[in-house]
Amino acid sequence: MIQVEGLTRRFTISEGNDILAVDNLSFTVQAGEVYGLLGPNGAGKTTTLRMLLGLLRPSSGRATIEGFSSVDQPDEVKRRVGLVSTSAGLYPHLSVREMLLFFADLYGVPPDRAATEVERLAGLLGLKDLLRRRCITLSTGQKQRVNLARALVHQPPVLLLDEPTLGLDVLGSQVVVEFVAHLRSQGKAVILTTHRLDEAERLCDRFGLLHKGRLVCTGTLAELQASTGCRSLVEMFIQLVQPEPTVRAEVLMES
Amino acid sequence: MSHQSPDWRAGLARLGRLIRKELAESLRDRRTLATLLLMPVLLYPLLALAFQQALLYSKVEKAQRVYRIAFASEAEATSLTAYWSLGRKLLQGRHAINASSGGNPFIEPAPQLVVLLATDPIAAVRDGQVDVGVRVTPPGGFRIEPGKQLPQINVELAYRSGSTYGPEAVRYLEVLTGDTNTWVVASRLQSWGERLEAQPCRISAREVTDESGKQASLVPVLVPLILILMTMTGAVYPAIDLTAGERERGTLEILIAAPIPRLSVLLAKYVAVWVVAMLTALVNLVSMTTTLLATGLASVVFGANPSILLVLEVLALLVLFAAFFSAVVLSLTSFARSFKEAQAYLIPLMLVCLTPGMLALLPDLQLNGWLAVVPVINLALLARQVFDGTAPLGGAIAVVVSTLLYSLAGVALAARLFGTEAVLSSDQSGWSDLFRRPTRTRSAADPSAALLCLALMFPTYFILNGILAQLSGLDLFIRLLIAATAQVVLFAGFPLVSAWLGRVEWVAGFRLHAARPWAWLLAGLLGVSLWPFVHELILVQNAIGLSSLSPAVRERIQSVLAGWRQLSPLLVLGVLALAPAVLEELFFRGYLLRALAGNSGSPGKAILGTAILFAVFHLLVTDSLAIERLLPSLLLGLVLGQLAWTSGSVWPGMLLHALHNGIVILLGYYQPQLLEGGWLRDEQTHLPAWLLGSAAVLAAVGLASLWWAERSRTRAISES
């Protein structure tokens, strides 16, 4: 479903001063699988997602979704992806229904089908009473639920969730957790980036630990435990970001 | 998943929904509503109040004009005031005869003279105690008695430099003295038995109105500036909100993550900004007019009788102004990362736009030549000359076309800037991205890049045409060479640079693929058979009065034709038939059509659009318009577009175009011989039936084959 091969992105800060944001990344995600892309701030998670979606051009390497290249067929890729990100906002002066219908329109969903889909998602995410409210009046948790609905309104087979629980309270996070479980049951391929490692352990089928743009280890929780000797993701994470991380990463890679 | 509707109506309906969303988002915002409604509703009554106060003040001043005059002695004061009061009566009598004293501050109402005595009248003036100080030599009073010699008095009137009333009072006293002098001398002559008119030469002033009886109005001066200001201020807030605002709200990323062409997103935003700018300007105009009517100031601004025509003119100009400024503002704000940054860009823009706007109000500037394509100046000039009733049609069309092209370019630019990587990740640098070549080659130019190229070409074409017309003194051969070079620069230079910047593949991007033999055959058939119908079409248009070329221009064309005949026919053919054919095809059917049609299966809209633009380019003949060329060029453009599309190559179109041009040029070149041999009568008569008949057969075969070729092409594609 999602295939990433040797994906690399370099940013030029000034003449001759490059930053390697993503370095030779390769992984795959199957339908019905939730892949956790984990790493500290600045590890390159968001840049990776943006390249997957065709919003940023990779410096080298390629990413495909259902066989479509994010560079050559960005529209085909975009049609197949729903994006939920921390920074995603809402149009303050549109009502929730208008907001969802607008995005359905952007994705080319016919109006009658869009209306039914909005009702269905409103039921699923508890938005029925909010549909007529302007977005500016919603609480943070309500806004995030609208965002989840917005990402699903065109029924994409792939979901990219960039820190979807950031800034949410326990109840809000729980909605996201249930949402991801729902996506898996629907056979969607999901990539989830998060800081909440406890949550990631519960939600993800496989993990990729990203550090300074490089994928330092990848596998299921059991595989990672076996290879690193750490019991939890938190332990692995701390090991990863401690001083001289490159040395540690190499140790991890070798193991 | 993907749900693409093949129907263009569905596409249009979707654009309508996008526009509705942008409008809802914009108009529900309190800040937009404030600029839209509150400002104009409060501003104009306040302005009018201030204006009225000023007017009232000046009236009060008029009624109470009082001059304080200092004399050294009572005798001097008595003598001179008596002399002046006679002058005052004479002055009023003089103007009663002329009956046009209104507005003359010396007559209606007459100034009041306040007489003061001072030991040193000059010092009193210096101290500002009086307006005029009088020194009489010899000092003392004087009398004028019948039969006695007239006295010789020198009266020095002193006033303080820079004082408000001093100079005015002195002028008044000079007038009074002069009138009395004349009367005294005349009556003395009369008493000697001389019949003499007191005023051999009499001057009177008359206020004149123009032929329509209108009072001079401020409309041509005020309205263009008001329109610039209003449409710009109206566009600013929604433009920032719908572009930089997207980024601030965090909706930019999810918006560009959707599979919708950025041009349609920006087009929807543009229409929304345009509507809000129009509404703002309308509310402003309504509020202004209401205030003026309510305060009785309307006649000062609009002249005696504002007409419905004036209202329509203002509305039409409003549409144009709003179209332009919305695009400019949008292209600027679409690059901004925040409200603050967008505002920072807009302040210089305001100044940049107002200065040429003011310039255009100079009465010497006229809407012709290159000024018709200079942004902002052309709009302000058009507005002024429309209200004056002096706008030339050709110039007006050049303004409308160039303004629409600039707006299109502005939207295209906005589409390129909006949501670029630079905007998304602020660590990247800015405007240079526009000129940075992409890393990968592409098979067709980006539509926005091609439109930008076109928008730059139009004014250049216009200016080059103007320059060529100025060179009439040069040798014809040199002029032809310059014309050919200009064509190369325009139709090859611009698209080549644009293609290089966009890293467009030369062969694919300009449709330079080799053509099949059938395509060449078709091009040959159509090339030799279409010109008679163009000729007939022009005749028909002339017959129904659709001709805009003046006899002077026709005469000039005839003299140019005569000039050509001095040169080799091959040279004339090369420069006037072959070069334009090759170059125009390279740009219109090569670069532009390829970019507009993209990889879509249905090129209808792109072919039509290219043909319209092709026709517009042929509309302008130096400084006049050849309306009759519009329809033939459009039809020819359609055929050429379809041929390029069906054959997949730009070469056959060049052949068709060159043959068509060549035959028309040769007919002009050999016109005398053809007339002599009885082949032609004159250019205003129909072609012989046998010629039309055979051309019709050839053209029908050609067009039918083209249709058949296109049908089999699409069938082959759908089968594969």
Image (tube, grey):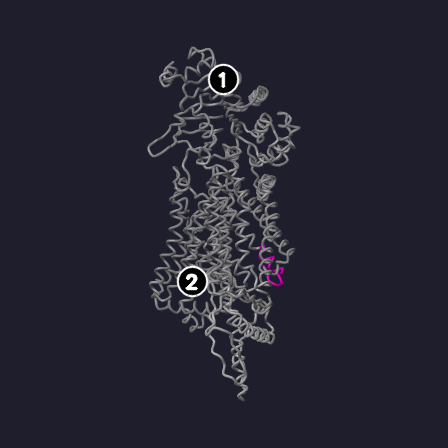
Please say whether residue B302 is one of the residues in the magenta stretch: yes
Answer whether residue B541 is visible to the viewer in this image.
Answer: no
> In the image, are marks 2 and 1 on the same chain?
no
Q: How dense is the environment of label 1, judged by Cα within 10 Å: few (below 14), some, or many (20 and up)?
A: some
Q: Which residue is mark 2?
A: B663
Residue B250, label in figure: none
Extreme-bottom residue of the structure: B193
The relative height of residue A11 versus residue B212 in the rendered view (above or below) is: above
Residue A197, label in figure: 1
Q: How far from the left and from the top, in percent, is residue B185?
A: 51, 81
The relative height of residue B617 versus residue A184 in the rendered view (above or below) is: below
* A226 horizontally vs A134: left or right: left
Q: How far from the left and from the top, in percent, is residue A145?
A: 59, 26
The one nearer the camera, B178 or B44, is B178
The residue stretch that appears in magenta = B301-315
Chain that bears disc 1: A
Chain that bears disc 2: B
The one nearer the camera, A8 or B658, is A8
Q: How dense is the environment of label 2, judged by Cα within 10 Å: few (below 14), some, or many (20 and up)?
A: some
The relative height of residue A131 versus residue B170 in the rendered view (above or below) is: above
Residue type marked 1? Leu
Q: Residue B317 sits in which quadrant?
A: bottom right
Residue type marked 2? Ile
Q: Measure how far apart labels 2 and 1 are at the Cα level.
A: 79 Å
Q: How far from the left and from the top, in percent, is residue A63?
A: 44, 29
The one nearer the camera, A67 or B103, is B103
Please say whether residue B414 is one of the residues in the magenta stretch: no
Q: Secondary structure at mark 2?
A: helix
Answer whether residue A239 is visible to the viewer in this image.
Answer: yes
The one nearer the camera, B526 or A224, is A224
